[in-house]
Image: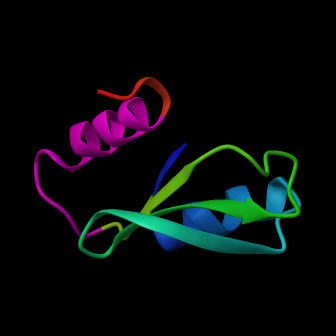
């Protein structure tokens, strides 16, 4: 899951009953990848990005990162 903006991330986390966010790695500097804690989707990778942060390729980079997590090289 890729969430852009703090308000969006907070709303989605709340809707899924998450009690927190556990950072496991970084897609790029200041763009964490982790999982929600005690939510309906505990095992799904969640990438969050500040709304005004990132480059033109950030979304593609995040999708590639998730693909590598599941498919490997």
- Residue at image x 89%, y 61%? 17
- Residue at image x 19%, y 63%? 54
- Residue at image x 36%, y 34%? 68
Tag count:
0
Q: Position of residue 57 (x, y in %)?
A: 13, 44
* Residue 69: quadrant of the picture: top left
Residue 72 in the figure: left or right of residue 42:
left
Relative vertical location of residue 2 with respect to residue 66 in this rendering, above or below: below
Quarter of the image for the C terminus: give it.
Answer: top left
* Residue 52: quadrant of the picture: bottom left
- The furthest residue to the front: 73
Q: Main secondary structure of the magenta part?
A: helix
Residue 73 in the figure: left or right of residue 54:
right
Q: Position of residue 20 (x, y in %)?
A: 75, 75
Nearer to the camera, 63 or 51: 63
Relative vertical location of residue 4 with respect to residue 44 in this rendering, above or below: below
Residue 44 in the figure: left or right of residue 1:
right
Q: Position of residue 66 (x, y in %)?
A: 42, 38
- Residue at image x 12%, y 57%? 55
Determine if the magenta segment contains residue 67.
Answer: yes
Residue 62 in the figure: left or right of residue 55:
right
**Magenta residues (range):** 52-69
Nearer to the camera, 9 or 30: 30
* Residue 11: quadrant of the picture: bottom right
Relative vertical location of residue 21 with respect to residue 40 in this rendering, above or below: below
- The furthest residue to the left: 56
Nearer to the camera, 35 or 9: 35
């Amino acid at each position: 899951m890729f969430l852009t903006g703090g308000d969006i991330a907070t709303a989605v986390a709340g809707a899924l009953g998450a009690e927190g966010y556990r950072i496991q790695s970084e897609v790029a500097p200041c763009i964490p990848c982790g999982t929600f804690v005690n939510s309906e989707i505990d095992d799904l990778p969640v990438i969050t990005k500040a709304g005004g942060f990132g480059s033109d390729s950030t979304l593609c980079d995040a999708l590639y990162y998730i693909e590598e997590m599941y498919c490997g090289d």
